[in-house]
Amino acid sequence: MPTPALAEVLVTEGVDVQDVLTTLRGSAFIRIGDFDERAAVELAMRLRAAINSGDSRQGMQITKSAMKFDRQIVAIALVNGARVLYSDDDGVERFAASCGLATKRVAGLPVPASQRELFEDAAGSDPAADSGNDVQ
C-alpha cells in the first residue's frame, strides 16, 4: 500500500489508525511502500515523459497536486514490484494503465465468504447472487 494511499485511508472519519496499521503490518499480502528515492526517480522520469508529450495530465481535468499525488501512488507501486493496483480513483487508474500496471476497482472485488452475511443483511439480499462472487 503506497503511503499516500495509506494517508487517504487513515484520514477517513471514524477510522482507528492503530487498528488499521496493526492489520496492514500483520498481513502477509500487504506491504506499506514509502515514497523514497527510487519512487521519486520513477515519478520524475514518467512526469518528464508526460511533459515532453505535451499532455502531462493525460487529458484529465484534475489539479496539478492531485495529478502528482496519483502518480506518487503508481510510482511507489511500480518500484515495489506490484502486479495489480487496487484503486477506485480514475486518475490513478489511468496513469497506472499508461505504465502497464493493471488496476482493479475495490468495489468490484469479491466479498469474502466470512463477510457475505453482513452484505446480505445490509442489502436485503445476496449482492453477489447475480454475478458469481463479484459485488456490483
Image (cartoon, rainbow, N blue to C red):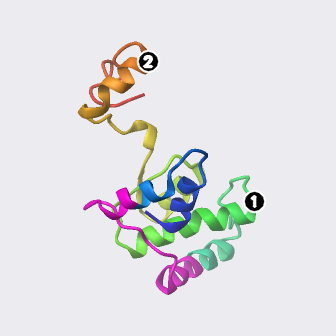
Q: How many marks?
A: 2
Which residue occupies the extreme top position in the image?
124
Q: Position of residue 125 (x, y in %)?
A: 37, 14
Above or below, 5 relative to 136: below
Direction from residue 67 to residue 94 in the image, left or right: left
For the residue carrying disc 2, how many other residues have a C-alpha within 10 Å: few (<14), some (14-19), or many (20+)? few
Secondary structure at badge 2 equals: helix
Q: Nearer the viewer, residue 110 or 123?
A: 123
- Residue 35 in the image, given as x and y percentages of width and height: 52, 76
Give the percent coordinates (x, y) of residue 38.
47, 84
Identified at 67% across, 77% down, the residue is: 52
Q: Which residue is identified by label 2?
A: 123
Which residue is drawn at the image coordinates 43% and 71% (left, top)? 33
Q: In the shown orientation, is residue 45 left or right of residue 99?
A: right
- Disc 2 from disc 1: Cα separation: 36 Å
The quarter of the rendered structure image containing the N terminus is bottom left
Q: Which mark is residue 130?
A: none
Viewer-nearest residue: 10 or 136: 10
Q: Which residue is mark 1?
A: 63
Q: Is residue 44 above or below residue 121?
A: below
Q: Quadrant of the C terminus?
A: top left
The type of residue carrying mark 2 is Ala
Q: Nearer the viewer, residue 120 or 130?
A: 120
**Residue 86, magenta (yes or no):** no
**Disc 1 marks which amino acid?**
Thr
The residues colored magenta run 22-45
> Residue drawn 38% across and 29% down?
135
Q: Is residue 30 magenta?
A: yes
| Residue 83 image point, x, y percent | 33, 62
Residue 105 location, quadrant? top left
Q: Nearer the viewer, mark 2 or mark 1?
A: 2
